[in-house]
Image: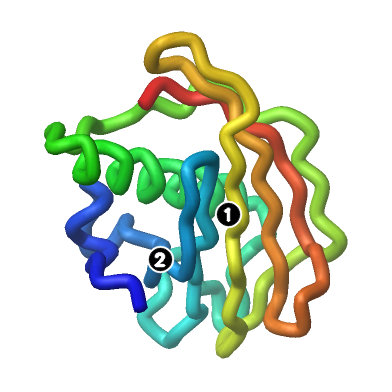
Amino acid sequence: MIDYRIEDLINHRRGMLLVDRLVSYDISGAVIEVILKEDTSFLNEDYVPAWIGIEYAAQAVAVWAGLQAIQGDKKIKTGLLLSCRKYKSTRPRFMLGETLNIHIREEFRIRRMCTYDCRIYDETGKEVVTVSLSAII
């Protein structure tokens, strides 16, 4: 069982805190859960546009970076998303009631600048988004 509250791992707060739970992690990445509820930010009637997946992936990276900071007895820093490359979605929206799993993997690092492979899966395990993010963490 993972004993970290998401709010302890990321500087985002209500309104812009879009991720719900740390599912798993290892030395090079993590899986973060998003549950699309009635109070979900960016909800448009019964869906969230798929391009919000960029922010889901960025916040998943921030959660993993926060976890690394806590485990290293360091302060959590606010990161900066530098770029998003090759965003591909198999559909235009995520539906109210869905649970998404965001898988992030660190691919490259020079000091605080990193590149991540990010993939979003729906609750059936189908990959619905792929994107490469670069960030300063």
Q: Which residue is mark 1?
A: 52
Q: Residue at x 30, y 47 (%)?
A: 67
Marking on residue 22: 2
Q: Position of residue 132 (x, y in %)?
A: 69, 34
Q: Is 64 on the left-hand or right-hand side of 134?
A: left
Taking 20 as reference, is 78 above or below it? above
- Describe the element under mark 2 as helix, strand or loop: strand
User: In the image, which is nearer the foreground, mark 2 or mark 1?
Assistant: 2
Judging depth in this view, the residue of 87 and 7 nearest the camera is 7
User: Residue 136: image x %, image y %?
Assistant: 41, 21
Percent across and percent down for residue 82 are 51, 21
Q: CA distance from mark 2 to mark 1?
A: 19 Å
Q: Residue at x 42, y 74 (%)?
A: 40
Which disc number belongs to residue 20? none
**What secondary structure is marked by label 1?**
helix
Taking the image as shown, residue 24 lies to the left or right of residue 13, namely right
The vertical placement of 27 against 37, above or below, is above
* Among the 4 quarters of the image, the one containing residue 76: top left
In percent of width and height, residue 75 lies at 13, 34
Name the image quarter holding the N terminus: bottom left
CA neighbours of label 2 inside 10 A, class few (<14), some (14 to 19), many (20+): many
